[in-house]
Amino acid sequence: MKTYSRHNCKSAHRTAQTFLRCAVPRAAWVAGHGKFALIAWCGVPTITLHQAIEPALQQRAVVDSLGCGGRCRKRHEVVHVDVGGTA
Ligand SMILES: [Zn+2]
Ligand SMILES: [Zn+2]
């Protein structure tokens, strides 16, 4: 699993949500809370955060089989978000 620890500004992000808005500026939306992100790189990226790895992997299994939207290309990735602080 990849760890996301790089973003595009010099401020310290306190939450994974603001971190990912910075790190993945193309994302249509970032939903939820937690350090584990399911990123759908299908068309415009969408990101859903989870508190633990298991629900993130479960959700990926669901979108892998059902598709995440109209232009799904099955590019669904679960990553760990390291915001660098104590978030
Ligand atoms: Zn940033
Ligand atoms: Zn998809």
Image (spheres, rainbow, N blue to C red):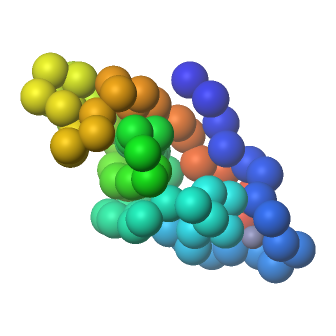
Q: Quadrant of the C terminus?
A: bottom right
- Image vertical order of residue 86 relative to residue 50, above or below: below
- Image vertical order of residue 1 relative to residue 26, above or below: above
Residue 25 is situated, as x and y percent measured from the top left of the image, at 62, 65
Q: Is residue 13 visible?
A: yes
Q: Is residue 38 or residue 26 the one in the foreground?
A: 26
Q: Is residue 69 or residue 63 the one in the foreground?
A: 69
Residue 21 is situated, as x and y percent measured from the top left of the image, at 57, 68
Instruction: Point out the residue furthest to the bottom here.
Output: 11
76 on left or right of 60: right
Residue 53: quarter of image: top left
Residue 60: quarter of image: top left
Say which residue appears at 42% left-offset and 65% top-offset: 28
66 on left or right of 57: left
Say which residue appears at 45% left-offset and 50% top-offset: 45
Residue 11: quarter of image: bottom right
- Image vertical order of residue 74 relative to residue 29, above or below: above
Say which residue appears at 35% left-offset and 27% top-offset: 73
Q: Quadrant of the N terminus?
A: top right
Instruction: Point out the residue furthest to the front here.
Output: 71
21 on left or right of 41: right
Q: Is residue 58 visible?
A: no
Residue 39 is situated, as x and y percent measured from the top left of the image, at 43, 43
